[in-house]
């Protein structure tokens, strides 16, 4: 059991003063660490420290910030083994995936360090120059979920710092340890107060979204929480980036090569045991390929080695928490009652831990909970279709719009269909691939704003037009 995790306020390690909570290992339900939640007055201290640090940090040069971000990337790399182990123990994913998460955190930090913040020259004439500068916003509040906790924390913090903001971060109470350690490492190189961390759940998150000392919230999590944050943010017109839930459709066209795409479909649907915002969550397969596709997916699912992510050779871990485990179970039970066929998996594994095997559900259609709701877990409904316009309408008949995909051997045709999908990212012959240089975000109830790339960085800035009469 770990004993040395702390919050970080103004460069100091401090313990929360509120109630104790246990961080559980989803593979065995054992206690990984016991922490204490922050009080609202500790949150106020953290915001106060970030505001104070902002006074000087906002004027740090681009070179200084870039250098510090590279030092942060180096720190993460030096401590990669420890961070990956913490991620496996509290999040549950297999070690290779935790290593990929830490590697992603490094890559995103380095890429963000390389970006520049432009000055846009609108006019430069004999008598006048107008330019638009992009200034930092102030204090950024980062609220993160439990599925990719370390990488998402970096997605929030690195661009905030690059643009000259200071940060107060609140990780999910289910997986706080990796982020607390990350922020401790950051504080070994950053000036005090530039990045702070507080523990807590809805109450502290709520207080952050209402806080008058916070200028922007970057939030990754569920749509209902995003809606609450948006309501609270109005009091001081906080800027918002909301990365919320999705229910991504994938469409397999009749000309697709099933052998070539089956592995890709499986991996992007079950990435992180399906607990990935932009995982493929509803698979629409043309009638002519339906049986072949199901057969292939079942073979891949049955070849998975389900177990504790710390064990050698494990490819598939547990669901992260009891609530999500119960939801997945309820959705599959409902599908059974509606007459769907469970081709593999379909029931929790016996014993300790939140293990649910990769589950393929066939002969199911829209109007069933498993298709209409975000399962966020290791179960994929495979839905038969015959008409392309009809399947596009069904893919779009959804309140959320994060990602979507079209799988085909005819790229041109696939692109025409992809462009008709109502989602923030449409992939062709792929899904769930996020990259540091490609803007990523949702439409409809999946949120607004983007992360990554130049466009993502600019969301941490406010424009100032300088109008010079020469
Ligand atoms: P959640 O909304 O329950 O919690 C996310 C965070 O919000 C946690 O830190 C939580 O403590 C905090 N929180 C809870 N109530 C709050 C409140 N009232 N005010 C402020 N903060 C509050 O989400 P989750 O269950 O941790 O994450 C799963 C969801 O996140 C899924 O819907 C998934 O699709 C989505 N997600 C989206 C993306 C994306 O990039 N779009 C990425 C990952 C996850």
Image (spheres, rainbow, N blue to C red):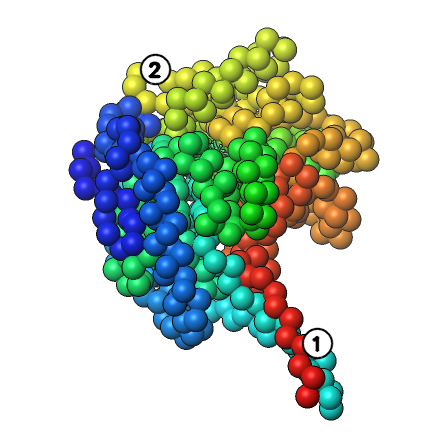
* Badge 1: residue crowd in 10 Å (few <14, some 14–19, many ≥20): few
Q: Which residue, as the protein is rendered here, is positioned at the far bottom? A: 126
Give the image location of residue 171, x and y in percent. Answer: 38, 41
What is the quadrant of residue 145 in the picture?
Answer: top left
- At x 24% / y 25%, what residue is drawn? 30
Determine whether, in the image, residue 260 is placed left or right of residue 9.
Answer: right
User: CA gap, disc 2 to disc 1?
Assistant: 65 Å
Residue nearest the viewer, comparing 226 with 67 = 226
Determine whether, in the image, residue 335 is placed left or right of residue 51.
Answer: right
Determine whether 318 is above or below 55 in the image.
above
* Badge 2: residue crowd in 10 Å (few <14, some 14–19, many ≥20): few
What is the quadrant of residue 295 in the picture?
Answer: top right
Residue nearest the viewer, comparing 404 with 121 = 121
User: Do labels 2 and 1 touch, CB within 8 Å?
Assistant: no
Q: Is residue 300 visible?
A: no
Tell me if the residue at label 1 has its CB under 8 Å from ligand 1.
no
- What residue does disc 2 label? 350
Of the numbered discs in the image, which one, if any, rests on residue 122?
1
- At x 64% / y 24%, what residue is drawn? 372
Q: Secondary structure at mark 1?
A: strand
Mark 2 against mark 1, which lies toward the viewer? 1
Determine whether, in the image, residue 242 is placed left or right of residue 156.
Answer: right
Determine whether 374 is above or below 180 in the image.
above
Q: Which residue, as the protein is rendered here, is positioned at the far top? A: 337
């Amino acid at each position: 059991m770990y004993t040395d995790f702390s919050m970080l306020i103004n460069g100091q390690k401090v313990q929360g003063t509120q109630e104790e909570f246990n961080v559980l290992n989803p593979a065995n339900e054992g206690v990984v660490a016991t922490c204490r939640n922050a009080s609202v007055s500790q949150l106020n201290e953290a915001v106060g420290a970030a505001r104070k640090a902002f006074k000087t940090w906002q004027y740090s040069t681009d070179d200084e910030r870039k250098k510090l971000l590279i030092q942060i990337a180096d720190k993460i790399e030096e401590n990669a083994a420890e961070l990956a182990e913490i991620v496996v123990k509290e999040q549950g994913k297999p070690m290779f995936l935790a290593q990929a998460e830490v590697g992603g955190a490094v890559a995103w930090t380095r890429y963000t360090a390389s970006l520049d913040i432009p000055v846009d020259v609108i006019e430069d004439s004999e008598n006048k120059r107008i330019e638009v500068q992009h200034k930092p916003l102030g204090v950024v509040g980062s609220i993160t979920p439990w599925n990719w906790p370390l990488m998402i924390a970096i997605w929030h913090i690195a661009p905030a710092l690059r643009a000259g903001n200071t940060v107060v971060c609140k990780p999910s109470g289910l997986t706080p340890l990796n982020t607390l350690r990350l922020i401790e490492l950051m504080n070994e190189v950053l000036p005090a107060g530039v990045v702070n961390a507080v523990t807590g759940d809805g109450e502290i998150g709520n207080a952050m979204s209402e806080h008058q000392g916070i200028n922007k919230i970057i939030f990754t999590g569920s749509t209902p929480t995003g809606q609450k944050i948006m309501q609270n943010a109005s009091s001081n017109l906080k800027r918002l980036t909301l990365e919320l839930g999705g229910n991504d459709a994938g469409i397999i066209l009749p000309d697709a090569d099933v052998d070539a795409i089956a592995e890709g479909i499986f991996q992007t649907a079950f990435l992180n045991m399906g607990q990935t915002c932009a995982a493929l969550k509803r698979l629409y397969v043309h009638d002519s390929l339906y049986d072949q596709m199901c057969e292939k997916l079942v073979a891949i699912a049955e070849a998975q080695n389900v177990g504790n992510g710390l064990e050698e050779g494990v490819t598939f871990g547990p669901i992260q928490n009891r609530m999500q485990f119960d939801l997945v179970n309820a959705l599959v039970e409902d599908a059974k009652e509606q007459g769907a066929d469970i081709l593999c998996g379909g029931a929790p594994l016996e014993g300790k831990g939140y293990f649910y095997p990769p589950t393929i559900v066939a002969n199911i259609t829209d109007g069933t909970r498993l298709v209409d709701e975000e399962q966020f877990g290791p179960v994929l409904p495979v839905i038969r279709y015959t008409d392309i316009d009809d399947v596009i309408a069904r893919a779009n008949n959804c309140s959320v719009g994060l990602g979507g995909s079209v799988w085909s051997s005819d790229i041109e045709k696939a692109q025409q269909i992809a462009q008709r999908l109502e989602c923030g990212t449409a992939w062709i012959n792929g899904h769930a691939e996020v990259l540091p240089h490609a803007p990523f975000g949702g439409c409809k109830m999946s949120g607004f704003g983007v992360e990554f790339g130049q466009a993502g960085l600019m969301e941490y800035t406010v424009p100032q037009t300088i109008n010079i009469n020469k």
